[in-house]
Image: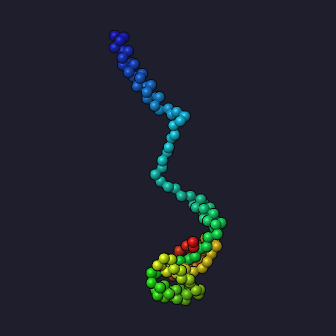
């Protein structure tokens, strides 16, 4: 009767030992925790934007972009009337960008962007020049 009790006892003991020893981590193991969501901290983004300003970037407000020069010039003339300022035409590759203003910091550009949008240019946005 004692022999029949010893085999299940040994089996349970071995299983329990292997289970407990596999749960402990050794010093040379690395544990990684992966998250599947990205959390953006607004304060961090603002600090990064301030760091960009220290790099001496130049910001402009882009009003529109055209592939044809005559469309870009016509749009620039209409924008000149609405904004009481002369927009610039910048050509990058084969695209003409109609921009206005030249700002040394993103905050000033954003303030002017609000003014530009109030004048009817809802698709305008701040852009840095290379």
User: Quadrant of the image for the C terminus?
Assistant: bottom right
Closer to us: 122 or 57: 57
Query: Which colour assignment does the render follow?
Result: rainbow
Displayed quadrant of residue 6? top left
Horizontal side of residue 10 vs 56, given as left or right? left
Q: Position of residue 70 (x, y in %)?
A: 46, 87
Asked whether the viewer can see residue 114, the reply is no
14 over 73 or under it: above or below: above
Displayed quadrant of residue 14? top left
Query: What residue is rendered at 60% in x and 62% in y?
Result: 48
Q: Position of residue 115 (x, y in %)?
A: 58, 79
Displayed quadrant of residue 16? top left
User: Quadrant of the image for the N terminus?
Assistant: top left
So how many labels did they put on this image?
0
82 over 27 or under it: above or below: below
Query: What residue is rendered at 59% in x and 59% in y?
Result: 44
Query: What residue is rendered at 59% in x and 86% in y?
Result: 85
Horizontal side of residue 76 vs 19, given as left or right? right
The extreme front residue here reads 93
The extreme top residue here reads 1
Q: Position of residue 78 (x, y in %)?
A: 51, 88
Query: What residue is rendered at 58% in x and 61% in y?
Result: 45
Q: Position of residue 54 (x, y in %)?
A: 65, 66
Asked whether the viewer can see residue 53, the reply is yes
């Amino acid at each position: 009767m004692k022999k029949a009790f010893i085999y299940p006892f040994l089996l349970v003991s071995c299983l329990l030992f292997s289970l407990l020893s596999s749960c402990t981590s050794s010093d040379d193991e690395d544990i990684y925790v992966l998250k599947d969501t990205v959390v953006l901290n607004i304060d961090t983004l603002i600090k990064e934007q301030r760091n960009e300003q220290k790099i001496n970037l130049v910001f402009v407000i882009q009003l529109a972009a055209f592939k044809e020069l005559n469309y870009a010039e016509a749009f620039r003339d209409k924008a000149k009337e609405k904004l009481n300022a002369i927009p610039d035409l910048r050509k990058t590759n084969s695209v003409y960008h109609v921009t206005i203003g030249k700002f040394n910091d993103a905050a000033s550009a954003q303030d002017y962007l609000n003014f530009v949008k109030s004048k009817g240019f809802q698709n305008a946005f701040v852009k840095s020049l290379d």
